[in-house]
Image: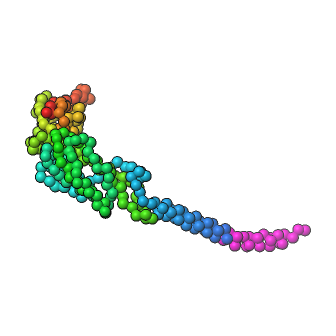
Amino acid sequence: MPDVAGRRRSVRALGHDDQPVGQLGMAIRSSVRSWFTRCLVIAVLGVTIGVGPTSLASASVRHLTVVSTSSCGVLSSTGVSVTGGTPCVASTSVGTAFQLSLRKGLHWRGLRTSSSVVKISNVVSGSTGGLTATVVAAEPGATTLTASGAPICVPGEACPQFVLLWTLRVVVSSSSTPRAMVVTLGDSGRHDSAVVGQRVYVRLMGGTSARWSEPIARPTTSLHRITGTSGRPATATFIAERRGVTTVTSLDTIACSPTCSPSTVLFRITIRVG
């Protein structure tokens, strides 16, 4: 007869001896997991610390508008009106000078103007970053000032990789800043005139619907829109940048019951910039 009791003892012994093997396996898995975690942390730290000093040529570029501690980078000055936006807009007249001050902590370069409307001088970059310059309005018209800033990095230390693009729109009128033009719903169908540097405020409140569309200007070469909203009222702020004829429009869609078809009312005003 087979030794059944012996086999049972063997089975029981095998099961008893299995327990340390299971514990050993758990210990091995725990060690591997810990080792892998340490390697991963070291790799991440290596990537972070390994970033060296950056340059405008090697950094990845994100086009952002930088607003410095002063108003859009423009220090307060008599004869200059600054409106926040993307980009900010500075309105002034021929012969007026104002100061730029771009924030510290960034190395700025490439300050330039897109036209001869303004002249830039006295450009100074600080040792801790930042930039100052003098801008003089030379002739009527509009121009865009731009500059790019990158972080000031210390070799061997973590440093972000980016370039910021600062932009300022400057509109210069031939004389002192003209009085703003206010346009309402009652002006629809009119032809009006403005001069370079003049602001046009549109406010549409009346009508039969819940909201007017955001006022737009076409073409955009003469009137530049600074801000705009739809609703009741719908509003917009434009500034006359160069000579030409443009049309400002907005739509009022009249809601009605299912027994009729929706209709649209058009607001329209033509403005000649001279």
29 lies above or below 222: below
| Main SS category, magenta section | helix
When the figure is inspected, residue 41 is found, relative to residue 265, above or below; the finding is: below
Q: Which residues are magenta?
A: 1-23
For image coordinates 65% across by 68% down, the residue present is 28
Quarter holding residue 115: top left
Q: Nearer the viewer, residue 249 or 26?
A: 249
Give how far across and how far down residue 165 sits, in percent. Answer: 32, 50
Residue 18: in magenta span: yes
Locate the C terminus by quadrant.
Answer: top left
| Rendering quarter of residue 137 | top left
Residue at the spot x=21%, y=46% of the render? Answer: 119
Tell me which residue sits at (87%, 70%) in the image. Answer: 3
Residue 17 spot, x, y in % from top left: 74, 72
The image quadrant where one finds the N terminus is bottom right
Residue at figure coordinates x 25%, y 26% from the top left = 261
Residue 85 visible? no
Taking the image as shown, residue 127 lies to the left or right of residue 75, namely: right
Most foreground residue, 144 or 20: 144
Viewer-proximal residue, 72 or 156? 156
Give percent across and percent down for residue 43. Answer: 53, 62
Tally of numbered tags: 0
Give whichever of 124, 59 is nearer the camera. 124
Q: Is residue 240 visible?
A: yes
Q: Tell me if 216 is positioned left or right of 34 in this view.
A: left
